[in-house]
Image (cartoon, rainbow, N blue to C red):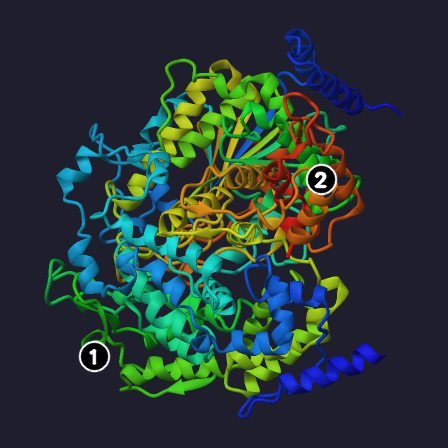
Amino acid sequence: MKRGLAAIVLAALFAAPAGDVRPALGAPPAMPSDEAAIVHALSRLGFGPRPGDVERVKSIGLPAWIDRQMDPRRLDDRATEQALTALPTLTMSIAELQTKYPRPKAQEKAADPQMAPRALYDRPPPDNRPARIVAEMQAARLVRAIESERQLEEIMVDFWFNHFNVHAAKGEVKWYVTSYERDVIRPNALGRFGDLLRGTATHPAMLFYLDNWLSTRPDFTLRFGRNRGKRAGLNENYARELMELHTLGVDGGYTQQDVTEVARAFTGWTIDRPRDTARFVFRPAMHDRGEKRILGMQLPAGGGLSDGERVLGLLIHHPSTARFIATKLVRRFVADDPPPTLVDRVAATFLATDGDIRAMLRTIVTSPEFWAPEARHAKIKKPFEYVASAVRAVGGHVDARAGFLLARSVAEMGEGLYGAQPPTGWPDRGEAWVNAGALLARLNFALALTQRRLPGVTLDFSPIAVDRAAPEATLDRLLLSLLHGEASDQTRSVLTAQLASPEIRRQTSDDRGPADTDVEKLAALVIGSPEFQRR
Amino acid sequence: MLTRRALLKAGACALVAVAAPPRFLARAANAADARRKVLVAVFQRGAVDGLSMVVPYGDRDYAAARASIAIRPPGGGDADAAQDLDGFFALHPALEPLMPMWRTRALAVVHACGSPDRTRSHFDAQDYMESGTPGVKSTPDGWLARAVGTRAAPSSPFRAVALGPTLPRILRGDAGAISLTSLERFDVRASAEAAVARKGFESLYEQSVQDLLHGTGRETFEAVRMLKSANAARLAPENNAEYPRSRLGQSLRQIAQLIRSDVGLEIAFTDAEGWDTHVGQGAEQGQLANRLRDFGASLAAFVQDLGDRMGDVVILTMSEFGRTVAENGNRGTDHGHATAMLLLGGGVRGGKVYGRWPGLARERLYEGRDLAVTTDFRALFAEVAGRQLGIARPATLFPGWTGAPALGVVG
């Protein structure tokens, strides 16, 4: 009972900052503050604890730590920014990327037709190829997940990019995707849903990926460019995914007729100078000016750009959107099968705050469902989360070069960053990621990491291996540092049994001196253990 | 009761206990599973345009609906035009490598096949086709996993295998299906000095905990041991078969290795991506033609590689739905309804296009725009699973469905 009171007091403190939006509904917020709760927060709102993180959070208090994570601009992240300067494409404009990383000429392609995928992985693409752009973005994601102080922001960038997925390998997208993430996703990752929706709807990456840039009124004839004289017409691709995947959800109550009408509303939303600056433009000549009827809303004939804007407005405020976004957020932060009571409250927050992402996250982290025992360790880490959390757990630091390699490991486990071809993005349910081949890839990564076979990753086992001559104590420190007391009895006994192995407990040559514990091999086993696959 | 599986498992464990397992023991373990029937399923994700893959050139409304993407009808020895099948349908010219199988009646087509559900969402339609329950999202497992489950006691970790980095919905469930991308890399890759790691990992996942992770871990290490002793990754393609270097080509090459190494494979699954041709679909040449060329060449190489062994194998292709009959404003096609599915192999009554043709006249189209479904995909899948895998009442693989008369496409 005492603990419950303390939690309420803490939560009240936590919810104090002015202008803060309180959860619209539900029980009084409750937030535990014990060590296990801190580990839970670091694992759900970030990419897992580094050595010393639990103590650091304890010293400032869990609510304060969460507050800071909610306001990432105030966190000093210069060290990460410094590491990212080795990846020059991150700050380039679309026009600059198109100039510096031009399309290979047809004959160059022919000369190098069969560069096997493995060869492509084994080293970063050369510095003048378009593939380099995406490789640098992948590397940056890994560097940020591992190094950045702004852990929650990185989680949300991953979440929203996946929600508004574009496939970097499709056509022009590779020149647009840097700006897409930097200028649309990242600045709004903890902002408002509506800004994300409007930003993606008008970004060339989305316009190209879901083909809307080509969608026109029926019988429109192109007057300029290579396809001059050709006729164009309606393309439904964006309209459908806008409702199914970005807003309402597939059961959100729209029909095929709505898809067609929404597609008509977005005709003329296209890309100006797609091979240069690639800016959004509305071309009235391409627009279908007829009357439209969408989900009961009538758009009178003669509308222009406002047709699409009104559709976005309708979708942003639709209760199905609130429910769909709430479901996905709760699935990410709480459990594969989201507790309906919490989904209801997060959806209510969405509607009450006009899609304020911070407010929705507050509803989640102050909910009993988030802290419930059944939510702890309930999520299987996605490959990206697994790799980042493993490096962090062993006190690893990475440079940009390591980022390339780690991204390759993530891809081997099934999650090629920026490589999800379907607009659904990558799944956020455990069963998608647990299978024989992927599990072996995880175990092999654990070995490669701890055996220092990944150039650019520096590890620090010294806090664990303070006394290599004392194997039991070393194992205890390892389990505490990596699994935070969550090792099952069986895992502990399996690992204890390993201590007898001469490969783990190396004797000195004369067999008289103290044994030397192979901490790295033990660490590989712990990182490969079932417990470490969960967060 | 001591099952055959338990015995074989015990045997496999005994094998790893000694440094170099005697080959005859491994072969004896394999012989029990040798030469069983195999079903290979290939999912064309993204909704393949069935009207370009198997062209209904005899339908007078076909060419009119597709001003720039209709495939040129066969005739006059035109090798770049569609390849005639029966005077009404023709194969896309990029699928020419499959024509020899049509002539030997090892290739059959089921056209206007698809889901009774009206969804045009890729995700939902794939989900329904893989769960085998159109319109029902709560089905926990996939129908191929259920097909594995109805069969006699399992005896090999390789009974059901998906080639790819994730286990697809169609094989999720209690079947113990495994997924992998590379036979060669399917192992704990530790230096000899770190062999302790492999044993350590194995012990960690050997615990009696019943969850997804432990179950997967146990199956994984069993499979690793078996694959090592069978040496499947070393088998070179036979009969001069040349696989494309594409993902599909390499997946099929490895499925053939599993079949030829007699590890007990019954169901194999792989994806072929890139069919969502909203823009610039192309006709005899172009985007879709390139995808079909890889598709046809990969399947043809597989058939050639397996040679006589194809007598035990049936390949079934599927796609979540078809595409609009009329081309859209960008010389592409949008999401439609029915599509065409292919069957290839020894038990197939090939040389025939199955299914009632609904016609492409506007009043015959589904919702006024798409090819109508005249064969429920469950009718096809049930027949293939029933015949090829020896399942007595295959309709039960599809809960909520009462069955349909057989097409007669598998003998």
Q: Is the residue marked by circle 1 packed among few (<14), some (14-19), or many (20+) residues within 10 Å?
A: some
Q: Position of residue B263 (x, y in %)?
A: 62, 21
Residues behind callouts 1 and 2 on a single chain: yes
Q: Up-down: is B187 above or below A442?
A: above
Which of the 4 quarters of the picture holds residue A29? bottom right
Kindly identify which residue carries mark 2.
Answer: A470
Q: Name the one closer to the observer, B101 or A148.
A: A148
**Chain hosting mark 2:** A
Relative horizontal placement of residue A492, taking residue B376 as reference (left or right) = right
Q: Amino acid at mark 2?
A: Ala
Q: Up-down: is A390 above or below B296?
A: below
Residue shown at 69% from the left, 76% from the top: A367
Q: Position of residue A232 (x, y in %)?
A: 22, 64
- Label 1, label 2: how many angstroms apart (C-alpha)? 76 Å
Could one spot residue B406 in this view of the protein? no
The answer to whether marks 1 and 2 mark residues whose Cβ atoms lie closer than 8 Å is no
